[in-house]
């Protein structure tokens, strides 16, 4: 019982203020709370299971730079999809299509974002220290602690969604995803290239950021133009 509480509290503290917790605030602008809970819970169980049972196997097989670049693309994609948005009527009209797979989308986003994060490293450390005999306790402790911290992010996002003006949470989500995307891209390039190529890394990141900003601006203007035509 002491081991379970120790693992739970460690994982909870490690996740507080982490990017995935903030990401869940952003995801509340795109998906229902139920879908986010299902997707997040599944991702946490799978991730912590891999971390505890397989140790550092996933991280050793997949290069850190590749994980970061995949995560960056995921963040930027969700930033653009948030910018595109959907009207309530359109969301209801596609309830049997897009919304049906919302938990899977949340699962994939959370999985990629959390892969290689400090909370996963914490689970790997506990798994290695305690051994396979305590694997189930460590797995449950890590999962409950991580989910408890992330549920705060979900609830904050839900409260913001119901208490703030229309469009505010979408704007906040776009900003969060964009910052995470560009910063994670920088981290991936830093791992891929050598330390003596700092200027090149910064240049590529800045160029990618500018291109992303231009694409978002075009999307915003086109969306605004179409909205004006409908009105």
Image: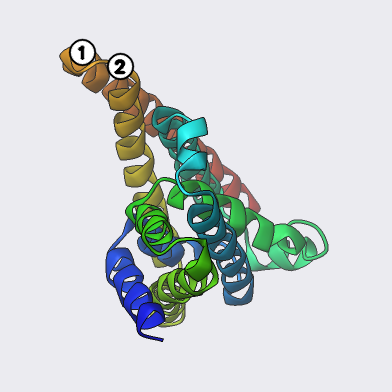
- Alpha-carbon span between mark 2 and mark 1: 7 Å
Determine the residue positioned at 54% across, 38% down: 222
Determine the residue positioned at 47% across, 76% down: 144
Above or below, 206 relative to 107:
above
- Disc 2 + disc 1, Cβ < 8 Å: yes
Q: Looking at the picture, how far across and down is residue 132, in whole percent?
A: 52, 62
Determine the residue positioned at 46% across, 69% down: 138
Q: Quadrant of the N terminus?
A: bottom left
Above or below, 208 relative to 34:
above
Residue picked out by circle 1: 197
Above or below, 36 relative to 127:
below
Q: Looking at the picture, how far across and down is residue 30, in whole percent?
A: 56, 62
> In screen coordinates, is 183 left or right of 76?
left
**Residue 231 visible somewhere in the drawing:** no
> In screen coordinates, is 93 left or right of 71?
right
Residue picked out by circle 2: 193
Q: Which mark is residue 167?
A: none
């Amino acid at each position: 019982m002491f081991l379970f509480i120790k693992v739970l509290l460690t994982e909870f503290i490690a996740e507080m203020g982490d990017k995935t917790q903030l990401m869940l605030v952003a995801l509340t602008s795109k998906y229902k709370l139920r879908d986010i809970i299902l997707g997040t819970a599944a991702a946490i169980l799978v991730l912590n299971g891999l971390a505890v049972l397989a140790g550092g196997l996933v991280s050793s097989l997949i290069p850190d730079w590749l994980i970061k670049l995949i995560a960056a693309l995921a963040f930027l994609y969700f930033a653009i999809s948030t910018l595109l948005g959907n009207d309530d009527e359109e969301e209801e009209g596609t309830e049997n299509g897009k919304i049906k797979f919302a938990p899977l989308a949340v699962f994939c986003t959370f999985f990629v974002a959390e892969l290689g994060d400090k909370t996963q490293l914490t689970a790997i450390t506990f798994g290695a220290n305690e051994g396979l005999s305590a694997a189930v306790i460590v797995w449950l402790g890590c999962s409950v602690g991580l989910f408890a911290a992330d549920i705060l992010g979900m609830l904050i996002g839900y409260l913001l969604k119901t208490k703030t003006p229309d469009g505010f949470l979408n704007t906040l989500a776009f900003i969060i995803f964009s910052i995470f995307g560009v910063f994670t891209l920088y981290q991936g390039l830093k791992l891929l290239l050598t330390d003596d190529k700092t200027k090149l890394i910064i240049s590529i990141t800045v160029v990618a950021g500018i291109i992303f900003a231009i694409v978002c601006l075009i999307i915003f203007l086109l969306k605004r133009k179409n909205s004006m035509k409908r009105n």
